[in-house]
Image: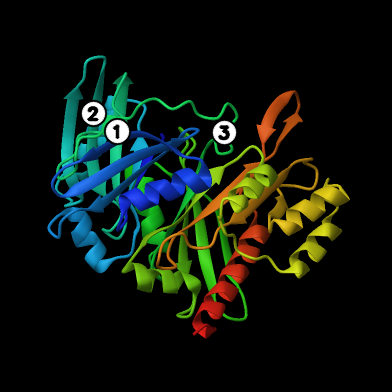
Amino acid sequence: MRIDHIHFFVTDAEITQNWFQQTLGFYPIAQGRNHHVQTYVLAHGDIRFVISSPLTRANPVADFLKCHPAGVVDLAFHVDEPEDLIQMMDQLEGSGRIVTSLQTEWLLHGTVQWLQIKGWGNLLRHTLIYRSGDTSPLPVMPDFPMVIPCPKVNPASTPLLVGIDHVVINVPDGELVPCSQWYSQFLGFQPRQLFTIQTNYSGLRSQVLVHPEGSVQLPINEPTSTNSQIQEFLDLNGGAGVQHIALQTPDIIGAIAQFRHHGLTFLDVPPTYYELQQSQNFPLTTEQWEAISSLHILVDQQEQTIPALLMQAFTKPIFEQPTFFLELIQRQRYVLQGKLLEVQGFGEGNFRALFTAMEQQQISQKKSP
C-alpha cells in the first residue's frame, strides 16, 4: 500500500494551486469544473495533491467549509491487488463506514477500481484505489467534476520533493488506542514507535503506524492536557483530522533555501536546541551546522553507530486557520553489510523540539493583537 493522492478542500482552489506551484514547485497535471465545484490535480515528484473549492453554496465542499477550516478531507491509498478492495468491502459491510461501494471504470488503456470509506472521526475519508494500465489521475467521483489532463509540463530533472514520507493525524484524548486499533484491523497497519512528550505547558502521546506492504506511515497524536496545541487543532478543526504532511527531499538544505526564497515560512527553532545538538558529535562540519541552524532544521540520529542523519523542518500553518502545516524531511542513506539503507524513525528529540516550537507559536499568536 502507498499513498495515491491527498485531497484538500479550500475556499479558493485557484489561489491555493497557484501557491503550491509558485512556492513549492508543483505543476498541474489535470483540472475540472462543473456547476458546483472546481478541482485541480498537482504533482511534484511522486506527490499528488488534489485541491477543490466550491462555486456555489450547495455542494459537499461548501458544506464542509461551513463547519471546518480548509484542510485534508481524503487520504487516498493505492492497493496492490483488486482483491484487497473486495476484502475491505466484506470487512466493513454493515458498519456504516462505506461512503461509496466498489466502483469500476473501464478506460481506453486501463482500469480503475475504487471505493471510499470513512476514516477515524468521520471528517477524514480514505479512497482505496487499484489501478491497472494507463489511468486518469483521479477517479470519477460523485459530486466532483471529471478532471481533464493538462498540457504536459516538463518537471525538474532533479525534483526537490520526491514523495510523501508520512501523514500525521490528531485525535481527541482517549482515542489514540481505538484509532490505532481501527487502522490495524481494517487497513493492515502495524504499531511501531510509541512515545509521550510533556513540557511545562502541555503534552501529547503519539503512536506511529506503518504498513508492512508499502511505504505508508501514520503517526497518530492525542493531547494529554486541555491547553495542548493538539487540543487547539481539534477545537479549530471540529474533530480529528490531518495535522501535517511530511514531504521527502533528497536535499533539505537546498530545498528550504529555495522555498524560503519563494516566501515559505518555517517554525523558529531556539538557539539552545543547536547548542545541545552540537554536543552530540553528529557527522557535520561547522559550515553545515551554520546552514542548518540558519534554516531552522532539526537534526537527529537513529543510532550513534549509524553515520547518517534524520533532518526535518516544519512550516508555519499554510491556511487561514492554524490547523495544517507541512514538514520537509530528509532521511540520509548509509551502507551496512553491503546494503544501502535509509535512516528510520521520527526522531523523538526532533518531535519534542517541534512540539515546544509549536507551543511558542501558539502562545505568541494569543499574545498578538
Secondary structure under the numbered disc 1 in the rendered image = strand
Q: Is residue 99 above or below residue 48?
A: below
Q: Is residue 231 above or below residue 289?
A: below
Residue annotated with mark 1: 129
Q: Disc 1 and disc 2: Cα gap in Å?
A: 6 Å
In terms of sequence position, does the residue under pointer 1 or pointer 2 come before the other?
2
Tell me which residue sits at (63%, 49%) in the image: 256
Question: Quadrant location of residue 308?
Answer: top right
Q: Disc 3 and disc 2: Cα gap in Å?
A: 30 Å
Front residue (pair 68, 54): 54
Residues tagged 1 and 2 counted as in contact (Cβ below 8 A): yes
- x, y percentage for residue 206? 51, 61
Residue annotated with mark 2: 113
In the image, which is nearer the foreground, mark 1 or mark 3?
Answer: 3
Q: Amino acid at mark 2?
A: Gln
Residue annotated with mark 3: 159
Secondary structure under the numbered disc 2 in the rendered image = strand
Is 262 displayed left or right of 140 in the figure?
right
